[in-house]
Image: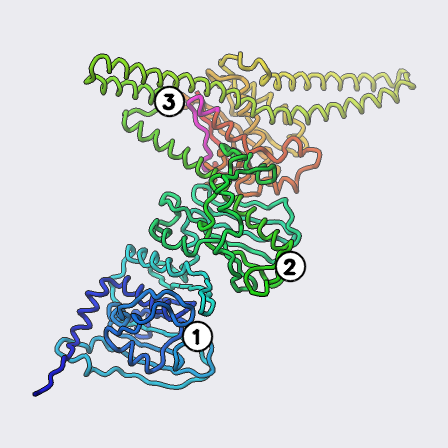
Amino acid sequence: MDKLSFTVDSALLSELGEKLVETVHIALVELVKNSYDADATLLEIVFTKNVKGMSEIHIIDNGKGMDIQSVQDYWMRIATTNKESKNHSAIFGRPLTGAKGIGRFSCRRLGSELKLITFGTRNGNSVGLQKKLERTEVDFPWSQFKAGTDVTEIECDGNFATVQNQSTGTTLIISDISEEWNLRGWHWLKRQLGVLTANSGIKRNGFTLDPGFTIKITAPEFEGGVRDIREDFMNAGWGTLTAYINDNHQAVCVLEAKSIGRKTITSSTIFKSLEDISLKLGIMVVDRMHMRDNNLLSIATLKTVLPEWGGVQVRYKGFRVFPYGDDDWLEIDKDRGLRKGQSKINELSAFANTLKGVDASRSLLNMLSMRSYLGSVNIGENAKGFEMKLNREGFISSSSVEQLKSFIRFAIDWTTILRDFSIRIEAQQESVIAVRLFEDLIHEKLEPVKYVESAVSYIEREIQNITRIMPDDERSNTQTSIFKATDVIRKHNETNKAELLHLRLVASTSTLLLIFSHEVKSLLGLLEQSKNSLTNLSALLQQTQRQQVLEITSTFTDLKTRLDDLLQLTSLVGADQRQDKPGQVALKGKLIRVEKVFSLIIKKYDISVDYAEVPNNIVLKNVLEAEVYSILLNVLSNSIKSVIAAGKKRNIQITAKREGGYNLITIRDSGLGLPESKYEEVFIPFISDPDGELYTNLEKRLNPEDKLIVGSGSGLGLGIIKEIVNAHDGSANFIKPKQGWNAELQIKMI
């Protein structure tokens, strides 16, 4: 009886390539999985062109590679089952990510030609530099595998050699690549690769320590340079925290986060046992709204990555120390379970108190789980006090180890406070969006003072419409209940507005009292000098000295006048201020008085304050006198600080005019200026110096005795201005300054 056998048409390769690997993006992921399964620690993907101008993809890994026999038996055998007999990679014990043997079909899907170059040992169980390796190079001309030809009859050119002192690894060079790449698929690809690069090191029983898996991509068309996928992955979450110990043994922390941008802090706490310590963590929140890059991150990705790879790892002189990162060694989850807030007064508690809306005693209740922090703290060569246990599992207890924990918790607790703050900022932004949507609903533009009343009235009208179909008794009861609730809202809102007005005035008190204190000290100094002069002259009461005494007494008169002016200003925010009624306030008269308040500083630092273009007939309506003073004191104080800090020509200009039914007040100065990106941020309370330049330069140029009046700033000034102006249906905004000036603030009020 004759024997028959199957043959395989070359069309099968194309058929399998299309069916098993649907897109080029999937194909590339499959090849990356092959490198991961081959125990590579570094994979480079390079999109480039060869000398012929043909586009290519180079996929280069440092895994265990293959010898000639493995290439023949596994790589060139269709649908091999070698992975099905194993669950883990040979060296690091990684759970295998692929098992279909479709790697070569992925190559076929990506381009028409493939060159395979691989270095491996005979047993295939070694990675890294080896004394002796087998080098195998094979060219696969996919275009020759045409329908009608037998796949087993087409030969692929290759060569084999034994080499010495080389490193294991595999390089795939795929030429004439497909043109079906697109941005959406690219983002999908990066999400898949991000899951693999989350492996930043782990120890598995019975295997060599896995140092992790890094992927770097060079794709000019999509990325514009070399991208480290793990870095991109960490930077795609809510925030990225970096921190280090400086030369003074202080913690220097930097946070880049959604909603709040870049924030920095240098601790007053000294970590005297620490040096050569740095930290980098991705802060991951499983919420799409709290991701900075939704193209790279997804909720599904984080749910896959964080349970296995989340946690703050420790790397000592470049090597990971276990079990740190796999356990709650920083007691983060313990504190969360105990609902532990900021339990004691410390510098972070004080910091929390400076943030609007943050309750310092509860600021840590929003702390994320320990698995939400993805990254490591690195202990360098110069660090002292870290000694490994005999079993190599962790460090022996020491002051350095305890301070390391304190340093990391300081950084994490600080970011938790800022996240609490960011949640409140986002709530404010959502409130603005809600107002805009409500305005679209009612087809009316609302002023801030009318938000609540308009919303309540709308609810009442809608309730009346809805309840018309109800029985009479139900309609009456429902309307009564709703109207009682809306009445509570109205009354509570009115109470809040009254209290807010008072709080704005109280907040201005600090500025007024600082000025008053400075002026009184100056006056007392002059009085003391005058007293001493009179004492000396008392024994010389002769005709020739009378003129001198008269000059001294005239100085007393000038001082008394100035003191009376200051007392009148401070009385504006006194105990009876709630009884004052809004009225009309002439702008120029108040501006003149405010300039007198700063007269000593203005003269001493040769500051020019020009308000010649403020007409006498500019009158602010329905406003408290104290509110006008609060605005003028804060804007002039800010400009004075800025022009002194700049150290150049110290010029300030204030103009005013009527325009479109409003008073338009403009304040310009020649100070440090303000980048356009900060125009909105500076109005956020407690952000007094967003770029950290103002007070650094003031410190250099300010006389010590004048620090009290210009001070370090509370960060409330511009916020106070904004609140007052908005309350009067106006606006306050920084705009691009007129030529010759560095900053320009415009205030519109009725």
Q: Residue 385 carries which label?
A: 2
What residue is rendered at 42% in x and 71% in y?
A: 91
Determine whether label 1 and label 3 are within 8 Å by CB. no
Question: Label 2 to label 1, Cα distance in Å?
Answer: 33 Å
Position of residue 722 relative to residue 200, above or below, is above
Sequence-first disc among 2 and 3: 2
Instruction: Place residue 471 in its image quadrant.
Output: top left
Location of residue 7 with respect to 291 vertically, above or below: below
**Residue 308 in the image: x percent, y percent?**
41, 56
| Residue that label 1 marks | 127
Q: Is residue 435 visible?
A: yes
Give the CA distance from mark 2 to mark 3.
60 Å
Q: Position of residue 592 (x, y in %)?
A: 59, 21
Q: As drawn, is 595 to the left or to the right of 48? A: right
Q: Magenta span covers which residues?
A: 724-736
For disc 1, the neighbor class at 10 Å (few under 14, some 14 to 19, many from 20) is many
Crowding near the residue tagged with mark 2, few <14, some 14–19, many ≥20 C-alpha atoms within 10 Å: some
Amino acid type at circle 1 is Val
Q: Residue at x 29, y 77 (%)?
A: 74
Labels 2 and 1: the sequence-earlier one: 1
Location of residue 550 in the rendering, given as x and y in whole percent from the top left corner = 81, 16
Please name the residue that numbered disc 3 is placed on. Answer: 452
Vertical arrangement, residue 185 with respect to residue 40, above or below? above
> What amino acid is found at the position of numbered circle 2 in the picture?
Gly
Q: Which residue lies furthest to the right in this view?
A: 539
